[in-house]
Amino acid sequence: MTHRIAINGYGRIGRSFLRALQESGLREQLAVVHINEPADLDSIAYLTRFDSTHGRFPGKVERHGDGLLIDDAQISVSHATLPQNVDWKALGIDLMIECSGQYGQRGELDAFLNAGVARLLLSHPGHSASDVDATIVYGINHGTLTGTERLVSNASCTTNAVVPVLDLLDRDFGVEQVFLSTLHSVMNDQPLLDGYHHSDLRRTRSAMQSMIPISTGLARGVERLLPQLMGRVQAKAIRVPTLNVSAIDLVVHLKKRVDASTVNRLLADAAAGPWAKLIAYSETPHASIDFNHDPHSAIVDGSQTLAAGDRLINLLVWFDNEWGFANRMLDVAKHWLGKIGC
């Protein structure tokens, strides 16, 4: 059976999801049949074919009537700015990937369901835990999906990167306190030049000339997935002038006494075993560009692991904030749709 998928909002993550599906070998199980994106069709086709970060699309892309032809698969395209302006029911969509980032509250998301979308997978957190039926980080709690849910969040790229690492540390050593500093590549809510762009004055500054502190809900996101750490997590974020690949500087106060080599051994063993799809481990002297188009949720840089005293550990975790996250969305979509009727 082939499940029919739509993408709403065809920006960085929407296009990465389509590419991830194209490279996955899952096209007989999951098929993108519709894209809703306000941009014009020529631009949609062009930015599907050519990407400054991930290169040329791994397949043939053509404009076909009012839609796209990807190899031999037709994808219809609409340009609505409101969910109710597309007849989703008539399109027979099994799952929508919501990648516009514009909708996070239950009432806004219900507009998609009321317009005929059967299930909605968000590429961002809900505004609150109650705005969605579940917040999922693949590899941590995807097994809780039953197939009856209609609104599911794939959390954020940073949450997907750090939660598996924290979960491993908490299971083996116990976590007392966590401090996270995310060094995140630029995003499209920042201007190239200083301008009247955002109510957050820091985000009015040029993305390519400065490192810019911004607010982050990462601590809340971690606590949603690891509730045993409630009240123990603090986080801050700095946008840095790179196009892709981000890092988390992770400081953890553990309950048990450990040293850097013990922590590295735990993470290396996990990366070589059951967590291999989610976590990679390396001690090679890396730069961020080395992880462009890396499908893992997190890559632990063991060469940067430090210990202060016998319970304070500092880790550096790399992640491709586009490609890794898009692949986890694909994993969640496949698993969730596989639960229908179970």
Image (cartoon, grey):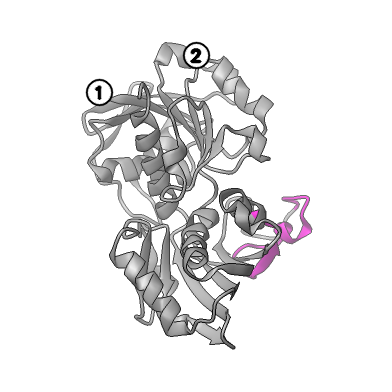
Q: How dense is the environment of label 1, judged by Cα within 10 Å: few (below 14), some, or many (20 and up)? A: few
- In the image, residue 277 lies at what x, y percent? 32, 56
Span shown in magenta: 196-217
Closest to the camera, between mark 1 and mark 2, is 1
Evaluate whether residue 241 shows in this view. Answer: yes
User: Type of residue at label 2?
Assistant: Asp
Left or right? Give the position of 9 relative to 292. right
Against 1, residue 185 (above or below) is below
Q: Toward which corner of the image does residue 77 lie, by quadrant?
A: top left
Residue at 38 percent across and 57 percent down: it is 278
Residue 335, placed above or below residue 325: above
Circle 2 crowding by C-alpha within 10 Å: few under 14, some 14–19, many from 20: some
Q: Which residue is outermost to the front?
A: 256
Helix or strand or loop: what does disc 1 sit on? loop
In the rendered image, residue 124, in percent from the top left (x then y), is placed at: 56, 43
Q: Nearer the viewer, residue 155 or 12?
A: 155
104 or 192, which lies in front? 104
Q: Position of residue 341 (x, y in %)?
A: 36, 21
Give the residue type that dot 1 points to. Met
The residue at which mark 2 appears reads as 87
The residue carrying mark 1 is 1
**Secondary structure mostly taken by the magenta-highlighted segment of the chain:** loop
Q: CA distance from mark 1 to mark 2?
A: 23 Å
Tell me what residue is drawn at x 72 percent, y 50 percent: 197
State the SS at label 2. Answer: loop
Which residue is most to the bottom?
Answer: 309
Upstream in sequence: badge 1 or badge 2:
1
